[in-house]
Image (cartoon, helix red, strand yellow):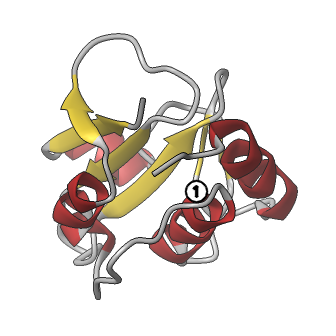
Amino acid sequence: MTWDKAGAVRYLQANAALSSQSRCAEYTRRAIEAGGLRLVRTDSAKDYGSSLVGAGFREVHGTPQRGDVVVIQAIKGHPYGHMAMFDGHIWISDFRQMNGFYPGQAYRTIKPAYKIYRHD
């Protein structure tokens, strides 16, 4: 299936709020769907890996590229984990994350496991 990565990124950029809305998975999923792919919905951001793979994404390592999606595992106080997309400059979820893909200080301190996915 063809994916309009640029369209997905534009959607996310246009809809991101100024601060977290606690809806990272919803915003990221909607952006991916705006690009033409459908994801199986999960209850938690941390569980979206298999849905991404099912939609044609693959796990990658190294320097992120525009359209890459990160899925981060849960930490204390954040049981649903986190999900965001790279726009080529910054990571965006339901807000513009100016300090990398970890969405807040608690994540940056604990550094939970994560995987990055790419659709070619």
Answer left or right for 77 relative to 50.
Answer: right
Residue that numbered label 1 is attached to? 93
- Extreme right residue here? 14
Seen from the viewer's position, the closer of residues 110 and 47 is 47
Left or right: residue 46 compared with residue 18: left
* Outermost residue to the top: 63
Provide residue 15's location: percent of width, then percent of height. 81, 64
Q: What residue is at 27 percent from the left and 76 percent from the top? A: 80
Quick check: 18 above or below 25?
Answer: above
Q: Residue at x 86, y 56 (%)?
A: 14
Q: Position of residue 98 (x, y in %)?
A: 64, 34
Counting every numbered tag in the picture gives 1
**How many residues crowd mark 1 within 10 Å: few (<14), some (14–19), many (20+)?**
many
With respect to residue 25, does 58 lie above or below? above
Q: Quadrant of residue 4?
A: top right
Residue farthest front in this picture: 1
Q: Position of residue 26 (x, y in %)?
A: 53, 77
67 sits to left or right of 10: left
* Front position in the image: 85 or 33: 33
Specify the quadrant that holds the C terminus. top left
Is residue 15 visible to the viewer in this orientation of the structure?
yes
Placement of 51 over or under 84, stated as above or below: below
Residue 74, visible in the rendered structure: no
Q: Position of residue 49 (x, y in %)?
A: 21, 58
Residue 79 sits in quarter? bottom left
At 76% from the left and 60% from the top, the residue drawn is: 16
Please tell me which residue lies in front, 108 or 68: 68
Q: Measuring 58% from the left and 67% from the top, which residue is drawn there?
A: 33
Q: Is residue 45 left or right of residue 85?
A: left
Disc 1 is placed on an element classified as loop
- Looking at numbered disc 1 in the image, what kind of residue is underneath it? Ser
Answer above or below: position of 24 versus 55: below
